[in-house]
C-alpha cells in the first residue's frame, strides 16, 4: 500500500515518521509542496493521498488523481469546503477528514486570551518595556465575577465551558441544538439576543454557515453590554470587522481576542518581515490596540492536535485503501 502526503510541515514530520514505523506495511512518501495541477503528477502509482491546505482541491486535480487510480483523499483538518465533491464522486475518490483533533487546544487558548485581556497583559508589557512599573490605572477584572456567553456548544464550546466554570464564571449558552446534558444544568438562553444582552464576555464557537455570516455587526453590538469582551477562535466571517473596529473606537466593545479574521487567507501564517509590511490595514489597526489580541489562527496549533491530525488522517487513508470504508468518510 502506498500513500503520498502533501504539504507536510517540519513540525508534522516526527509524527509521520512515528506513524510509518507503526505501519511497516505502508509505504509513505512525504512532500512539502501543496497538492495542485503541477504537483499532482507525484501521486501517480499511489493508492491514497493525504493533504492539508486552504487552496482548493479542484476538479482538474481530482480527475488526474482518479486517472492514477487513487482511491482516497484524506484531509488533515476538519473543513472540506475546498474539495470539489462532484469531481471526487465521479472519480470514485472517497474524502475523509479529521472531525476533532483537540477541542481542548482551542478552548485552552481562548481562555488564555481572555485572561490576558482581563489582566491587561498587553498594556503592562508595553509599560514594563518602557520602564514604567506602576500599577495604576490598569486595574484588572476577575473572571469569577463575570457572565460568559458561549455561542455554540459543540466540542470546542463545551470544552471552553468546563474551563470557564473552573474559574468560577457564570456561564450561559446559545446553540440551535441544545446539548441534553448542558440543558439539564439550565445554562441555555433561547435567543442570541438574550446571550448578547446578559454577557460580559462572548465566546464564539460556531462554524461559518450562511445564517451566521457577520452575526456580530452594528445592530448586534448595540444589543450588548457596554465594554463587552469578544472572543473569536471560530471563524472570521462571524464578525463584521468594520463594525467591530467602530465598536472598539466607541468603547462599546471593551476588548477582543481574534484568532481568526474574515480576510485571513494570504495574511495569517505568512512572514512579512516587519509590522509595516503586513498587507492588511484592518489587521494592523487591530494589532495596534492594547485591548485587542490578534493571533494568526494558532488556537489549534499544539503537539497533541498536530499528532492527532496526522494519525487520524493516515489511519483513515489506510483503512479506506484496505477496506473501502472508514468512519471519517465525508459524503457530499
Ligand atoms: P462542532 O461541530 O462540534 O460544534 C459546532 C456547534 O455549533 C454545534 O453544537 C452546532 O449546533 C452549533 N451551530 C451550528 N450553526 C449554528 C448557528 N447558526 N447558531 C448557533 N449554533 C450553531 O464544532 P467544534 O469542533 O466545536 O468547532 C467549532 C468551530 O471552531 C469550527 O467550526 C471552526 O470554525 C472553529 N475551529 C477553529 C480552530 C482554530 O484553530 N482557531 C480550530 C478548529 C475549529
Image (cartoon, rainbow, N blue to C red):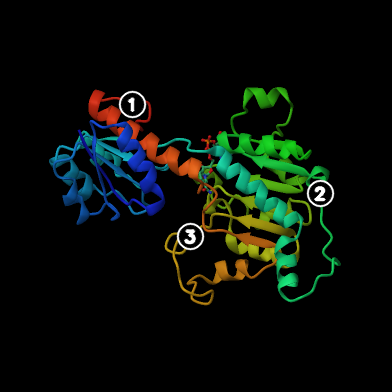
Counting from the top left corner in percent of width and height, residue 247 is at: 70, 62
Q: Quadrant of the N terminus?
A: top left
The residue at the point 51 percent across, 54 percent down is 297
SS category of the residue bearing label 3: loop
Chain-order first, disc 2 or disc 3? 2
- At 49% across and 44% down in the image, what residue appears? 303
* Mark found first going from the N terminus, 2 or 1: 2
Q: Secondary structure at mark 2?
A: loop
Pointers 2 and 1 in contact (C-beta within 8 Å): no
Residue bearing mark 1? 326
**Is 309 placed above or below 23 here?**
below
The reply to whether residue 102 is in sight is: yes
For residue 311, what is the image quadrant? top left
- The disc, 1 or 3, on the residue closer to the chain's N-terminal end is 3
Residue located beneath label 2 in the image: 142
For the C terminus, give its image quadrant.
top left
Quarter holding ligand 1: top right
Q: Position of residue 314 (x, y in %)?
A: 33, 36
Above-or-below relation of 103 to 38: above
- 1 vs 3, front mark: 1
Cα distance between the residues tagged 2 and 1: 46 Å
Q: Which residue is mark 3?
A: 264
Q: CA distance from mark 1 to mark 3?
A: 32 Å
Between tags 2 and 3, which lies in front?
2
Q: Nearer the viewer, residue 9 or 154?
A: 9
Q: Quote the CA–CA distance across marks 2 and 3.
A: 31 Å
| Circle 3 Cα neighbour tier, 10 Å, few/some/many (<14 / 14–19 / ≥20) | some
Amino acid at each position: 500500500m502506498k500513500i503520498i502526503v502533501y504539504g507536510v510541515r517540519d513540525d508534522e514530520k516526527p509524527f509521520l515518521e512515528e506513524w510509518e514505523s507503526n505501519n511497516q506495511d505502508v509505504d509513505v512518501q512525504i512532500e512539502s509542496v501543496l497538492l495542485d495541477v503541477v504537483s499532482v503528477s507525484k501521486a501517480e502509482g499511489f493508492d491514497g493521498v493525504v493533504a492539508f491546505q486552504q487552496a482548493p482541491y479542484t476538479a482538474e486535480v481530482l480527475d488526474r488523481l482518479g486517472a492514477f487510480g487513487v482511491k482516497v483523499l484524506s484531509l488533515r483538518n476538519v473543513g472540506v469546503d475546498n474539495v470539489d465533491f462532484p469531481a471526487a464522486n465521479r472519480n470514485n475518490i472517497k474524502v475523509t477528514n479529521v472531525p476533532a483533533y483537540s477541542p481542548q487546544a482551542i478552548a485552552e487558548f481562548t481562555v488564555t486570551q481572555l485572561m490576558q485581556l482581563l489582566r491587561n497583559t498587553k498594556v503592562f508589557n508595553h509599560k514594563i518595556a518602557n520602564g514604567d512599573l506602576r500599577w495604576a490605572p490598569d486595574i484588572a477584572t476577575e473572571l469569577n465575577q463575570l457572565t460568559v456567553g458561549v455561542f455554540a456548544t459543540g466540542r470546542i464550546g463545551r470544552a471552553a465551558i468546563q474551563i470557564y466554570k473552573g474559574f468560577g464564571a457564570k456561564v450561559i449558552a446559545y446553540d440551535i441544538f441544545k446539548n441534553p446534558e448542558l440543558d439539564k444544568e439550565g445554562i441555555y438562553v433561547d435567543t442570541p439576543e438574550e446571550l448578547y444582552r446578559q454577557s460580559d464576555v462572548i465566546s464564539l464557537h460556531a462554524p461559518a454557515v450562511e445564517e451566521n455570516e457577520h452575526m456580530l455587526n452594528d445592530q448586534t453590538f448595540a444589543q450588548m453590554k457596554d465594554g463587552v469582551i469578544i472572543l473569536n477562535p471560530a471563524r472570521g466571517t462571524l464578525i463584521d470587522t468594520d463594525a467591530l473596529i467602530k465598536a472598539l473606537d466607541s468603547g462599546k466593545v471593551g476588548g477582543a481576542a481574534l484568532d481568526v479574521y474574515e480576510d485571513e487567507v494570504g495574511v495569517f501564517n505568512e512572514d512579512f518581515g516587519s509590522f509595516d509590511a503586513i498587507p492588511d490595514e484592518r489587521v494592523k489597526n487591530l494589532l495596534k490596540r492594547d485591548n485587542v489580541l490578534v493571533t494568526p489562527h494558532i488556537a489549534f496549533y499544539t503537539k497533541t492536535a498536530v499528532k492527532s491530525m496526522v494519525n487520524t488522517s493516515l489511519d483513515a487513508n489506510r483503512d479506506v485503501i484496505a477496506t473501502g470504508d472508514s468512519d471519517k468518510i465525508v459524503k457530499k
